[in-house]
Amino acid sequence: MSKLLELKIRNYEKIIHDHNRANKRFYDELLVLIQQCEGRYKSVDKAPDDSPEWQAIVLKRTEQPVLSFRSRKMGDMSAHEAAKIRREVVELHNRGYPTATIAHILGIRASTAGRTIANYQHQINSQNARKVKM
């Protein structure tokens, strides 16, 4: 496997790790705010909409970390880059990565990764069928 592909995999894993850590911190902080609200009003449902405790919860909810990945189309790439991406899709597929993960690692659409895998499998099946006929 190429060093660049290994780097892409490590970058993907780092993004996931960082997101998980940020998401845990977000929920820990939200839980503290909920507990403070419940401590004062006995229930979040009973807190007035204009109370500082409820407003802190509402504000915190807008800060929830969002996990997102690039999602380029093959048409947006040079022919050389698209060919390289197709090879990387096949390599990752053969290593057992699911289609969505392949798409995230390579920064392409899941449908593009799926179509590339389907074309590869069709090509392999055609080659195997020709070998059997001989």
Image (tube, rainbow, N blue to C red):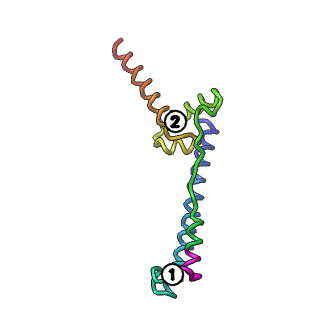
Q: Secondary structure at mark 1?
A: helix
Q: Secondary structure at mark 2?
A: helix
Image quarter where the C terminus lies is: top left
Image quarter where the N terminus lies is: top right
**Residue 8 rendering spot, x and y as whole percentages:** 61, 43
Q: Which residue is mark 1?
A: 35
Q: Amino acid at mark 2?
A: Thr
- Where, by quadrant of the figure, is residue 33 drawn? bottom right
Q: Which residue is mark 2?
A: 112
Is residue 15 found left or right of 34 in the rendered image? Answer: right
Residue placed most toward the observer, 134 or 87: 87
- Where are the magenta residues, as a range? 47-57
Is 30 situated above or below 127?
below
Which residue is at a point 60% across and 66% down the rendered structure image? 63
- Where, by quadrant of the figure, is residue 88 drawn? top right
Is 120 situated above or below 51?
above
Q: Badge 1: few (under 14), some or many (20 or more) residues near its Cα, within 10 Å? A: some
Q: Earlier in the sequence, mark 1 or mark 2?
A: 1
**Residue 113 rendering spot, x and y as whole percentages:** 50, 37
